[in-house]
Image (cartoon, rainbow, N blue to C red):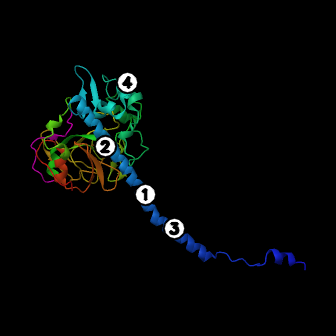
Amino acid sequence: MRNSWKKSVFPHDKHKGFTLVELLVVIAIIGVLVGLLLPAVQSAREAARRMSCSNNIRQLGLALHNYEGTHKTLPPSRINLTSPVIFQQSWVSMILPFIEQGNVHAAYQHGMPWYGRINDPLTTVKLPPMTCPSAPDARELPTSALYNAVTDKTRTDQPRWGYSDYGSINAIRNSAFVSVGLPSLGTREVLGAMGRGPEGVRFSAITDGLSNTVVVAEGAGRPGIYISGKKVNNPRSGIAFGTPFVPDGWGWADINSGFSIDGSEKLGNQNNTTTSGTTTIVGSCMMNCTNDSELYAFHIGGAQFLFGDGSVHFLSQSINGQTFVAVMTRDRGDIVGDLQ
């Protein structure tokens, strides 16, 4: 009778549990399910980021239309006057009141270089419409030596200027035309929808049609340089050569944050157009090969583009080269119907 209590409380001494094989099978099944679900989750997250990016660029389009409605012209890509007075403005600094940043615009010292210390409290502000959520959030600061070179030897400190993942189309160069099989321009370039200033472009001057002309596009990830999906050292000759940075376009106030498109090859080496229009061609890639003064996004397979009518289109990076060139010009009569 000594063990009768055990029999009454625990009528079955032997409990059936998982064997090692069964446990391994369960772990394997969970692993397979996670492997199947993870790409779907990542895809859903990127779709949400891409939609947010599209909304950002659409907001910029609305701001540009409101600016044009007020001033009867689009803002130029940049204004860079040094005589008789210094007056440096990027297109973003000009539309600040139209993206709910009127207080920043009012405090901005327009008679100073865009990189002047007096404007640091403003130009280091991160403007939500200017950053694409698919682009890297943490970005390295260029070296003090590069800051010194970019800012005409007036800055040796390293302010973190508010990023700019979107840029205006300044111009499309002769090398872009030649590299996609179009006739040479015989000159260096043709200007884009917003030109370079100091005067802006009227909608009526965009004779190719607002719905056929790109105004703003993605150039994400700056000041770091990205080439075909990787952060590498800059192969382009100049002040940024050998560093993991681009030489301009470091922030929304930077007057050189727009694009003069030459095209490149996949390793980031760019075509070149001299002042006379003579070209050096190394490739015909127009998108997502380098973010150094060329169009670049962190979306899969393409980038977001704002057209003059305010519409936003996601264009494939495999878009026909001649179609791409056509939508970058504003008054050449090269109108396209299908953005493929």
Badge 2: how crowded within 10 Å, few (<14), some, or many (20+)? Answer: many
Q: Secondary structure at mark 2?
A: helix
Distance from label 2 to label 4 (Cα)? 26 Å
Number of dots carrying numbers: 4
Badge 4: how crowded within 10 Å, few (<14), some, or many (20+)? Answer: few
- Three-letter residue code for mark 4: Ala
Q: Which residue is mark 1?
A: 42
Q: Secondary structure at mark 4?
A: helix
Q: Which residue is mark 4?
A: 107
Mark sitting earlier along the chain (4/3):
3
Distance from label 2 to label 1 (Cα)? 24 Å
The span picked out in magenta is 180-196
Residue contact between numbered discs 2 and 3, judged by CB atoms under 8 Å? no
Residue 119 in sight: yes
Q: Which residue is mark 3?
A: 31
Residue contact between numbered discs 3 and 1, judged by CB atoms under 8 Å? no
In the image: residue 31, left or right of residue 165: right
Q: Name the one closer to the observer, 10 or 320.
A: 10
In the image: residue 171, left or right of residue 304: left
- Three-letter residue code for mark 1: Gln
Question: Residue 85: horizontal and vertical position, in percent?
Answer: 25, 20
Q: Is residue 105 magenta?
A: no
Query: Which of the image's four quarters has the N terminus?
Result: bottom right
Residue at the far top: name it: 84
Q: Secondary structure at mark 1?
A: helix
Residue contact between numbered discs 2 and 4, judged by CB atoms under 8 Å? no
Tag nearer the camera, 2 or 1? 2
Distance from label 1 to label 4 (Cα)? 41 Å
Distance from label 4 to label 3 (Cα)? 56 Å
Mark sitting earlier along the chain (2/3):
3
Mark sitting earlier along the chain (2/4):
2
